[in-house]
Image (spheres, grey):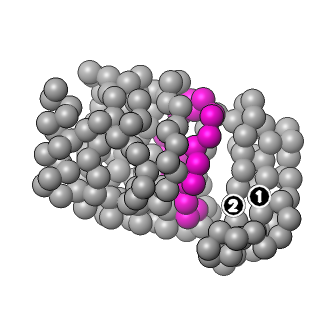
Amino acid sequence: YTLMYERVNANGVALDPVVIVSNTAGNNHLVTNLTPGQYYRFYAYGKGFKRIKSNYNAKNILLKVEQWGTTEWISFEQAFLDCINLDVTATDIPNLSGVLNMRQMFKNCTSLKFDNANINDWDASLATNMSEMFCGATSFNKSIGGMKLKKLVNMEKILDNTAIDCDNMSATLVAWKA
């Protein structure tokens, strides 16, 4: 797959030309030489791009998911684990048709709000593990009742320690019961 980035300002306006990291990126591709304290927009697309997984070094610098694109994802396990500054503003819907594991996808993403994003339209009907998906996402307060789910899915602590209020929790439970 192709992996590129550009440096942007806090408003997302490009400051430098796009840098092509690789036209043949593969599993566990690592981007180096980024300047701490700067903002970057990444582009990853093409055959072979199937998964993202944050590592300890990325947890403070991932800020936004602006678009999911057409990738046929295979896993979201720990995709954004501990990314405390992350929010999702993407209005498109990720293709989850190959995703079985969403465990800890947004765990401890304390800035996660999903404003303007449509998580209720996600089709996670093949996922078997969604445990702790939003656990510790202390700003998250959305109903996820519209999300399509499998009948038998591990949802242990999925909304533990979130900001979900009574209305959104009720809407989630009522929709899942239906």
From this view, report whether residue 97 is shown above or below residue 79. above
The quarter of the displayed image where residue 74 is located: top right
User: Residue 114's spot in the image, x, y percent?
Assistant: 40, 55
**Residue 53 in sight in this render:** no
The structure residue drawn at horizontal position 17% and vertical position 48%, both measured from the top left corner, is 169
69 lies left or right of 131: right
Q: Magenta stretch: give its range.
A: 62-80
The quarter of the displayed image where residue 41 is located: bottom right
For the residues bearing labels 1 and 2, Cβ distance under 8 angstroms: yes
| Identity, as a three-letter code, of the amino acid under mark 1 | Tyr
Give how far apart the Cα atoms at labels 1 and 2 are.
Answer: 5 Å
**Residue 176 in sight in this render:** yes
The structure residue drawn at horizontal position 39% and vertical position 65%, both measured from the top left corner, is 110
- Pick the front one: 36 or 20: 20
Query: What type of secondary structure mainly makes up the magenta span?
Result: loop
User: Residue 101's spot in the image, x, y percent?
Assistant: 45, 32
From this view, report whether residue 44 is shown above or below residue 47. below
Where, quadrant-wise, is the N terminus in this rendering?
Answer: top right
* Magenta stretch holds residue 144: no
| Identity, as a three-letter code, of the amino acid under mark 2 | Arg
11 lies left or right of 136: right
Query: Residue 5 — which label?
Result: 1
